[in-house]
Image (spheres, grey):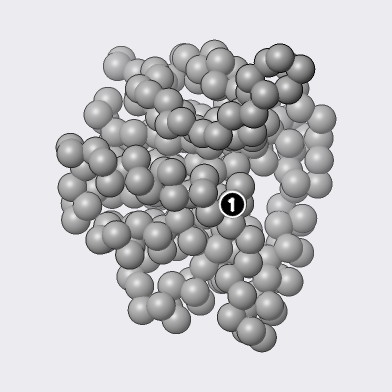
Amino acid sequence: MELEGSELGTREYWETSYTREIKNYKSHGDVGEIWFDEDSQQRIVDWLLKQENIDKETARVLDLGCGNGMFLIALANEGFTQLTGVDYSPKAIELAMGIAKDQALDISYNVADLTQNESQTLGSYNIIHDKGTYDAVSLCPDDPKEKRNNYLATVSKLLQDEQSHFIITSCNWTEEELVHSFEHLFVKHCTIPTPTFKFGGKVGNVVTSVVFKKKSN
């Protein structure tokens, strides 16, 4: 199954959006929208804080499609120190760097298109986080399937080892669809519970959050 292409899957859309958000931030300090709302972000932060095998000072964290960087700022405020964000929108990175600087936080940011196999320049990570970026790649009007496959191959290369975590939150794909699409590279580790709703006798989720680990070779 493919999703219908959308402007949300284009770099131009995000450049325009973040150009506007930079103006808003400079005018009155508004950091802009937190994708999927703050609750989705906080659920991931809370899950990470409960993991006894994660050392906040040594764990290398990469936020894919970081946008304004608020997820990394939340982690920095919890004591995580090895934080990197990437986005294919230069304007998103400009906004994120400005916010981090104003809050005196040491977070690294880079412009990178993860559908173009740019893993060799980014290093390796213990925790990789995706909130809506796989969704955006899936909405690309041009060859989304190939871009998704390139993206997942890049993520696999960026994960340090089989103990590392790839945490993804999606509003376009169910957990079953993610597990199926990722099975050649990743295995499901656990589900992070998200709010459910009931409609027509069926129970569903507005968003899905799943933790994967890299498949052993």
Number of marks drawn: 1
**x%, y% of residue 105?**
35, 73
Residue marked by disc 1: 37
Horizontal side, residue 101 vs residue 137: left or right? left
Kindly tell me whether residue 116 is visible in this rendering: no
Which residue lies at the image location 58% right of the left edge and 71% below the top edge? 31
Q: Which residue is at the far bottom?
A: 27
In front of the other: 85 or 123:
85
Q: Is mark 1 on a helix, strand or loop?
A: loop
Q: What crowding class fits label 1: few (fewer than 14 Cα within 10 Å), some (14-19), or many (20 or more)?
A: few
Q: Quadrant of residue 52?
A: top left
In front of the other: 132 or 7:
132
Which quarter of the rendered picture does the N terminus lie within? Answer: top right
Which residue lies at the image location 71% right of the left edge and 14% below the top edge? 201
Kindly tell me whether residue 138 is visible in this rendering: yes
Q: In which quarter of the image is residue 188?
A: top left
**x%, y% of residue 112?**
53, 52
Task: Name which residue type carries label 1.
Answer: Asp
